[in-house]
Image (cartoon, coloured by chain):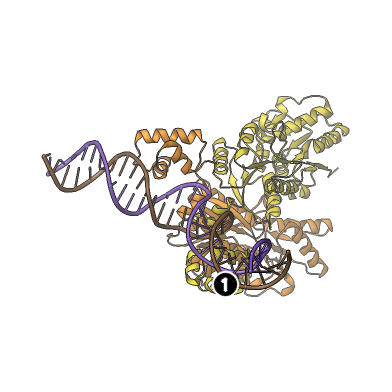
Chain colours: A yellow, B orange, C purple, D brown
DNA sequence: ATTTGCTATGAAACCCGTTCCACATTCTAG
DNA sequence: CTAGAATGTGGAACGGGTTTCATAGCAAAT
């Protein structure tokens, strides 16, 4: 491949002039411009992107940490991020983590090594405090409540919709509710925490442990969780699920066992809940993804927190 | 940020020795190693990834062109690619294209400029011939039949399953079949072409134009396509859909209109078809994605074509 | 006639690593 | 004891751009 020095040599101008000509940064005579352009075309020259990045000290790349690529939460966030990135000149690099500490640290290390200009954590295994410490190496945006850290964040006020949902259930005089929550390590799962807090706010009590199953994310998880409820003779009137697919998995279990299907509340407002007429919660993750991208690429953004209202979508009354 | 020259200065060794110490490439005394490591720790030094890339002439990045991020075809391919990339040391950059020629060319330009080591086109708008011409700038892998080009490819032999499906329909004495195909520009849509060819092979005839609707990819598209059939008094016994979600959209339309739902055949073997007991076709795109990644990262691979058998999954007989 | 202010150009420094190669030691085998 | 091998080290080139700064030519302003 031809380099800028080749162009300089072949055109008879200096590399400085060639650089100026190529970047149209002025101070190039019409004659020089033409001569250089001809040589560029002849030698099929294109400036090396890595060299430019090195020189500029930026990569125009945002690393997006995705623990789990099948869950709609992440798909929706990613879509939002990509929409926003579309003609921003930024590239998006996907960093699958599976919530593994070692992987997350490895990606943060890449940030330290300037492989990315910024990072977006759609979710995280390592504590926020620790994450915040890496901000000195580059901008880090998270997609949940940043708590007492100073991390920029775009996230959903999940409790708004959760409370609406529980109020609705309370009005229907539903008392026995099963909870299928996300990750097992409850202290780091904002979702699970918000769910239970909203429940407590409306119902004034805490659900018994046997009514909660954690680590539930997929259709299959939902199916097995329902099985577990059944085996332990836990019979919820309603099951509050972490995701529409989860709800559908639950439903599938009861149908296959020829048991009455309990009421369901899903999350993420996906095709499946629409299809089966299941009430759901929309956290507007596509919007949140877009907001996260903006926060990542505009370090001077103020405020650097964006909280979105979640909506409870009533269906199949 | 500290650079390798800072470390050299502070430790009293040369940058060559520092580089060797950091990369453990030998010829460094224990004393030097220790001294250098201490300074590295003190100055919080980490080698700049861009500089390394420039020096090495590689980016360890694969660009993946995705026209459409919601369709399962792309999601599955991407998952396959990411699985394979996982601990390969490669990063995956997503390049949304919407099948737009201008965008695809822009991404190819980036390849030319060495922003990626290789590219995977999960689908493409520009002709294969043109794509093939860019191979001189880097490896380009496609996910369909490369035809008469020399592009490396991982793809599904769609016709195997299509024929199985049509044979099954023929045995059931189904004669009126509606087709919901993907892109409108039929000459570049391998899927649509394969579908119709398989039909012709089994049924010995070509479906009438009024039985084919193109540009159908989503649930909503399916819904509207069904509406169109209905409005034009086209009443298929079976509708062969481009994707499970499409099939579900079709079903939704007929149900909402209180019309009998025609038989359906989906594609991609997703949750939705499982749920509604709709026969479907599995093209194994996760595997294909993984294969595409391997082809992209092993330029010397032989053969550089991998064709996967598709499977017709019979359900709801 | 002199100063000021552009335009145009190129040498050289800079971004930050890796690696080649020359040179000095220190082993090791014959 | 000595030639040859292996270890340790650093200067300098290299990867391929951008940018600063000095210099020169030339026109407008004083």
Relative depth, front residue between A76 and B34: B34
Whether residue A240 is visible to the viewer of this picture, yes or no, is yes
Does B89 sit left or right of B216 as displayed? left
Quarter of the C terminus of chain B within the rendering: bottom right
Left of B156 or right of it: where is A279? right
Q: Does B105 sit left or right of B44 as displayed?
A: right
Look at 83% across and 25% down and name the residue there: A204
- In what quadrant of the picture does the N terminus of chain B appear? top right
Compared to residue B60, the image places residue A156 above or below, namely: above
| Residue A57: percent from left, percent from top | 57, 50
* Image location of residue A311, percent across then percent down: 82, 42
Q: Nearer the viewer, residue A191 or A81?
A: A81
Query: Residue at label 1?
Result: A32
Chain letter for mark 1:
A
Along the line of sight, which residue is nearer the eye, B315 or A32?
Answer: A32
Picture coordinates of residue A105, whole percent (x, y): 56, 38
Q: Position of residue A153 (x, y in %)?
A: 71, 40
């Amino acid at each position: 491949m031809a380099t800028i020095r080749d162009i300089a040599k072949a055109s008879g101008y200096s590399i400085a002039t060639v650089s100026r000509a190529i970047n149209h940064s002025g101070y190039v005579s019409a004659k020089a411009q033409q001569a250089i352009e001809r040589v560029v075309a002849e030698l099929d020259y294109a400036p090396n992107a890595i060299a430019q990045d090195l020189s500029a000290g930026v990569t125009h790349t945002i690393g997006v940490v995705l623990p789990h690529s099948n869950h709609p939460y992440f798909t929706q966030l990613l879509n939002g991020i990509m929409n926003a990135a579309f003609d921003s000149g930024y590239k998006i690099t996907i960093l699958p983590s599976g919530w593994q500490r070692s992987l997350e640290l490895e990606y943060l290390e890449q940030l330290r090594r300037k492989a990315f200009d910024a990072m977006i954590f759609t979710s995280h295994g390592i504590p926020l405090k620790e994450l915040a410490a890496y901000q000195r190496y580059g901008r880090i945006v998270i997609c949940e409540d940043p708590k007492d850290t100073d991390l920029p964040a775009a996230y959903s006020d999940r409790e708004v919709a959760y409370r609406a949902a529980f109020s609705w259930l309370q009005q229907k005089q539903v008392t026995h509710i099963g909870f299928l929550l996300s990750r097992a390590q409850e202290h780091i799962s904002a979702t699970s925490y918000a769910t239970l807090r909203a429940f407590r706010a409306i119902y004034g009590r805490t659900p018994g442990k046997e009514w909660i199953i954690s680590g539930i994310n997929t259709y299959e998880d939902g199916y097995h969780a329902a099985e577990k409820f059944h085996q332990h003779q836990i019979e919820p009137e309603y099951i509050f699920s972490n995701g529409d697919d989860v709800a559908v998995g639950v439903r599938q279990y009861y149908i296959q066992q020829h048991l009455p299907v309990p009421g369901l509340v899903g999350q993420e407002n996906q095709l499946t809940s629409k299809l089966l007429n299941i009430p759901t919660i929309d956290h507007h993750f596509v919007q949140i993804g877009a907001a996260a991208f903006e926060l990542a690429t505009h370090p001077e953004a103020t405020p650097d927190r964006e909280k979105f209202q979640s909506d409870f979508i009533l269906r199949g009354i």
